[in-house]
C-alpha cells in the first residue's frame, strides 16, 4: 500500500493504529471505540482479534457505543 495518511479512510486509519498498538505486544491495551468507522464484519473480526489477546495473559479494555 502506498498511500499518504491523509488519503486513508477513517476505518483504514483505525486499522493502522490498531496494528501499531499491537506491534509491541502490550500487556495492557485500552481501546476507545476502536472500530466505530469500520464495517460490521470488520468490527467483528477486530473484536475477535482483541478478545483473543486476553487468552495470552494480557488485558484488553474496550469502550464502544452501539
Image (spheres, rainbow, N blue to C red):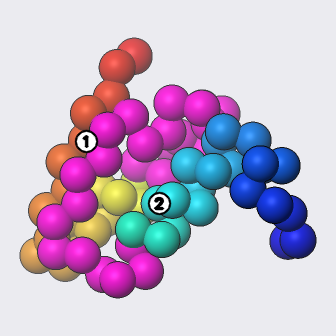
Quadrant of the image for the N terminus?
A: bottom right
Answer whether residue 41 is visible to the viewer in this image.
Answer: no
Q: In the drawing, what numbered circle is on residue 18?
A: 2
Residue at the outermost right position: 2
Q: Quadrant of residue 37?
A: top right
Q: Quadrant of residue 11?
A: top right
- The residue to which callout 1 is attached is 62
SS at mark 1 in the image: strand
Name the residue located 88 percent from the left edge and 71 percent from the top edge: 2
6 left or right, relative to 35: right
User: Which contiguous range is marked in magenta?
Assistant: 22-47
Q: Is residue 42 above or below residue 29?
A: above
Q: Quadrant of residue 55?
A: bottom left
Name the residue located 41 percent from the left edge and 48 percent from the top edge: 47
Q: Judge by depth and name the residue closer to the eye, 31 or 48.
A: 31
Residue at the outermost top position: 66
Q: Is residue 23 above or below residue 42?
A: below
Magenta residue check for 35: yes
Amino acid at each position: 500500500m502506498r498511500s499518504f495518511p491523509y488519503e486513508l479512510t477513517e476505518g483504514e486509519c483505525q486499522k493502522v493504529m490498531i496494528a501499531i498498538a499491537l506491534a509491541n505486544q502490550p500487556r495492557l491495551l485500552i481501546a476507545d471505540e476502536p472500530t466505530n468507522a469500520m464495517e460490521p464484519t470488520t468490527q467483528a473480526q477486530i473484536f475477535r482479534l482483541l478478545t483473543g489477546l486476553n487468552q495470552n495473559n494480557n488485558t484488553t479494555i474496550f469502550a464502544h457505543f452501539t
